[in-house]
């Protein structure tokens, strides 16, 4: 295994790790909102969050690339106030990856929250616990399988993503060239041995992750 191979895999893991961590933080409030609140545009919000599951990745990638342009408001704001150009950069790929991974984290968390009996929350409030205490001491311990599923599915989905990454990040070694893009490059170059190495590593990672998810869900079934 050469240095480029290792660096590409490390960059892939870095992107998947950051994406999963960010989504774990921001998805809980959204999942709780969707699980426990009723509002008139709820169906629209759920549809928008779920769009990456049905929308071609290149479509989302194209619109993000347009948004990243310094000629548009968002790109202008990021460059002016943060001195950051998101197009064809790791940061830009990370933002795209977070958006594209939203449903893979939010849906398991939302289903996990909805599966917890209402009387558990009510009992906690009756005992004088705050919403924050109830969240950490009652809700989270009762939805561990959902959390593990969200983390695993988000990570696995991220390491295999191609369309969004190539659209907003291009193919820059050490910056945006992740394993899925490297496989495409090696096949184009007729270097099937290296393409097979990348593919086999991603296959093993995905197999381990899915086996973990199914094993946990068999012991503690949740509705996905």
Image (cartoon, rainbow, N blue to C red):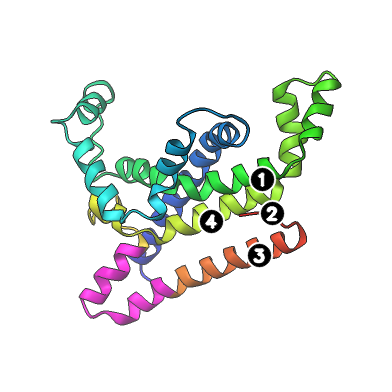
Residue 168 seen in this snapshot:
no
Q: Residue furthest front?
A: 40
Distance between the alpha carbons at the discs numbered 4 and 2: 14 Å
Of tags 1 and 4, which is closer to the observer? 1
* Magenta stretch contains residue 186: yes
Does the CB distance between marks 1 and 4 fall below 8 Å? no
Task: Give the secondary structure at mark 3.
Answer: helix
Task: Give the secondary structure at mark 4.
Answer: helix
Residue occupied by mark 1:
112
* Magenta stretch contains residue 17: no
Looking at the image, which is closer to me, 117 or 186? 117
Distance between the alpha carbons at the discs numbered 3 and 1: 15 Å
Sequence-wise, which precedes: disc 3 or disc 2? 3
Q: Residue furthest right?
A: 127
Sequence-wise, which precedes: disc 3 or disc 1? 1
Residue occupied by mark 3:
214
Residue occupied by mark 4:
153
Residue occupied by mark 2:
222
Q: Which residues are magenta?
A: 180-199
């Amino acid at each position: 295994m050469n240095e480029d191979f290792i660096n590409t895999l490390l960059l892939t893991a870095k992107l998947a790790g950051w994406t999963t961590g960010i989504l774990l933080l921001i998805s809980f409030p959204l999942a709780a909102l969707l699980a426990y609140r009723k509002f008139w545009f709820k169906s629209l919000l759920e549809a928008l969050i779920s769009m990456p599951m049905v929308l071609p990745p290149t479509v989302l990638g194209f619109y993000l690339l347009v948004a990243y342009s310094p000629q548009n408001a968002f790109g202008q704001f990021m460059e002016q106030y943060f001195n950051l150009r998101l197009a064809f950069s790791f940061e830009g790929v990370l933002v795209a990856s977070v958006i594209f991974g939203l449903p893979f984290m939010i849906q398991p968390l939302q289903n996990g929250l909805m599966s917890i009996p209402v009387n558990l929350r009510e009992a906690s409030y009756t005992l004088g616990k705050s919403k924050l205490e109830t969240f950490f001491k009652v809700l989270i311990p009762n939805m561990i399988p959902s959390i593990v599923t969200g983390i695993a599915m988000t990570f696995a989905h991220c390491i295999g993503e191609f369309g969004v990454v190539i659209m907003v990040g291009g193919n820059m070694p050490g910056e945006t060239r992740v394993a899925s893009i490297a496989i495409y490059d090696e096949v184009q170059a007729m270097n099937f041995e290296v393409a097979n190495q990348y593919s086999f590593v991603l296959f093993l990672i995905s197999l381990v992750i899915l086996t973990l998810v199914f094993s946990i869900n068999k012991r503690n079934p949740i509705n996905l």
